[in-house]
Amino acid sequence: MPDLDRFMRTFQVGGWRGAYRQVREAVASTEEVGDKLVKALAKTLRTNGGVPELPAIADIVEPSNGTSLLERFNALDAIVRAQDGHRHTKIAAEVAKTFLVQQDAVNGGSVPSNAVSQFGEEVCAALVEHYFFANARQHLITQDRVANHEGARRWQGEVERAIQPAIEKVARQLVQDPSANHLRAPKGIVKKESTSTLLEEELVHSRPGVPA
């Protein structure tokens, strides 16, 4: 099997693969790739049952009543086991552990009041990393689309900044409905133009004296 086919098989079908194809072939802007990723995230959440036990995990990252970090980690591990290692639950639990460690290091264990919303955003970002960026970075280097890991990380940062507002909206939906049954991608970054608008622009550019 050609290397490219093998690379593409590492992506899930649907939007994730389509987004990578856009990047590889340089046929879309950062914003257009971002729109594709947000749609892929929403679809993946819907078709995979959202994030089972997200509320229970979110409860663990909320301000504690003296519960130790170890006790919280044990509780997170128990949730993952109870869900038979569901991929999204496992990712959310790992995000929660990192979140708690960071808060412990920065704020001495004091968790901010917006912890749940911030945690939801980090879970969504981690899912995009899992399904897309983790594969895309290495593939882009292998296929000489970027020079090195630093270039791949820089490109990823640009895409992440572009989709951050949409990630926040998806996260709010997910926190409200962890099953993601009704979760939908927000309106795209790139505004779609009507056929009449595109036709008018084509007519303007085709007039004599007007640069194409």
Image (cartoon, helix red, strand yellow):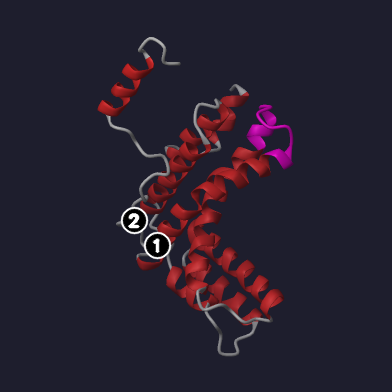
- Residue 23, compared with residue 112, is above or below; it is above
Q: Is residue 140 magenta?
A: yes
Q: Residue at x 70, y 38 (%)?
A: 151
Earlier residue among tags 1 and 2:
1
The quarter holding residue 13 reads top left
- Which residue has dot 1 on it? 174
Find the residue positioned furthest to the top: 208
The residue segment tinted magenta is 138-151
Q: Residues within 10 Å of mark 1 (few under 14, many from 20)?
A: many
Residue 96, x across and y down, in percent: 57, 69
Q: Quadrant of the C terminus?
A: top left
Q: Are marks 1 and 2 in contact (CB under 8 Å)?
A: yes
- Residue 121, compared with residue 156, is above or below; it is below
Query: Which element type, helix, strand or loop, lies under badge 2?
Result: loop
Q: Nearer the viewer, residue 90 or 109?
A: 109
Q: Is residue 168 magenta?
A: no
Q: Residue at x 48, y 42 (%)?
A: 34
